[in-house]
Image (cartoon, helix red, strand yellow):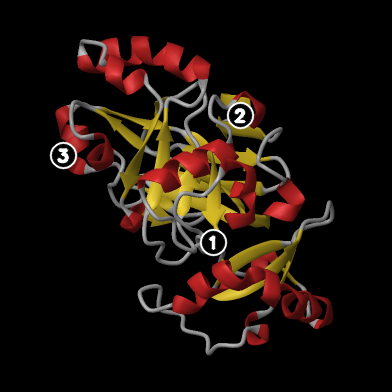
Amino acid sequence: MKLALFDDNRLGAVVVKPSGDTIVDVTEALPWPHDPDPLTAGWWRALCRDFAALRPALETAAAAGTPRSTDDVRLRAPVLAPSKIVAAASNYREHVDEMHEVQERTLGRVERWMMEFDVFLKAPSSIVGPGADIVLPADVVAAGHEVHHESELVVVIGSGGREIPEESAMDHVLGFTAGLDITVRSPADRSRRKSYDSFSPVGPWITTRDEIGDGSGLDILLTTGGETRQSVNTGTLITPVPRLIAYASSVMTLYPGDLLFTGAPPGVGPIFKGEELEMSISRIGTMNVSVV
């Protein structure tokens, strides 16, 4: 099942077809009042937690509802107020290799600790949806720092938990979406460099885990102006999704609706004002964002 948030943060079920994607409003199938305010929309986190129980009613509503073209609605980020964004560093071998040159160019030195796998946090306030603008911060531009794209598979946590075993990690996942981890290349703290407003575009919707499995074998593609910037298969992740969930949850409790960015593929590079970025992940979908 594909779940989207659209217009006034309504819940929609999406059907992807060659003739055009459609969406059906299934909000009224939820057992709680709809609250469109992201700051108080606990219904979204409850949906992430209780999706298995709610799914039959949502599927019935989707089958009975009137489909609309996704072009006729405003797609929002398919998440609401996660307690945190957890992100993986150095999770593709070729990206680790390329970062030696990137750091020499942007920092004048290589920070070897940054080449080791680990997790860090991004501010949830950095989230925007498909069709949004990535805003290059004035202070960063004035300082001459490069701002890079990092296109990533994103896990949306379902039931969540603490000390989740790797072998049952996928039982704690709602599904997957696409995300861009926009990054300033500077000596500043990693979380700060990645937490500016608009630095976490996600979308276009969530594909539930029953359609994706453990997130391996998916093709990620990022293009701009017809030029391919990043192209990778998630089967080459150093730390695959189940192990990543187990590791992250050994450090912090993962709550329903939390996001887990799985790491930057090779091909990272600077973005510039006026560019249009198109990112797609197979079996999930495509989103476009602009750089301003």
Q: Residue at x 46, y 49 (%)?
A: 163
- Marked residue nearer the N-terminal end (1 or 3): 1
Camera-nearest residue between 146 and 44: 44
- Marked residue nearer the N-terminal end (2 or 1): 1
Q: Is residue 9 visible?
A: no
- The image quadrant where one finds the N terminus is bottom right
Label 2 environment density (alpha carbons within 10 Å; few <14, some 14–19, many ≥20): few
Q: Residue at x 52, y 74 (%)?
A: 46
Tell me the number on the disc at residue 78.
1
Q: Identify the element where label 2 is drawn.
A: loop
Tell me the number on the disc at residue 226.
2
Q: Looking at numbered disc 2 in the image, what kind of residue is underneath it?
A: Gly
Q: Identify the element where label 3 is drawn.
A: helix
Estimate the spatial distance between the alpha carbons at disc 2 and disc 1, rounded to whole Å: 26 Å
Label 3: which residue? 139
Camera-nearest residue between 69 and 263: 263
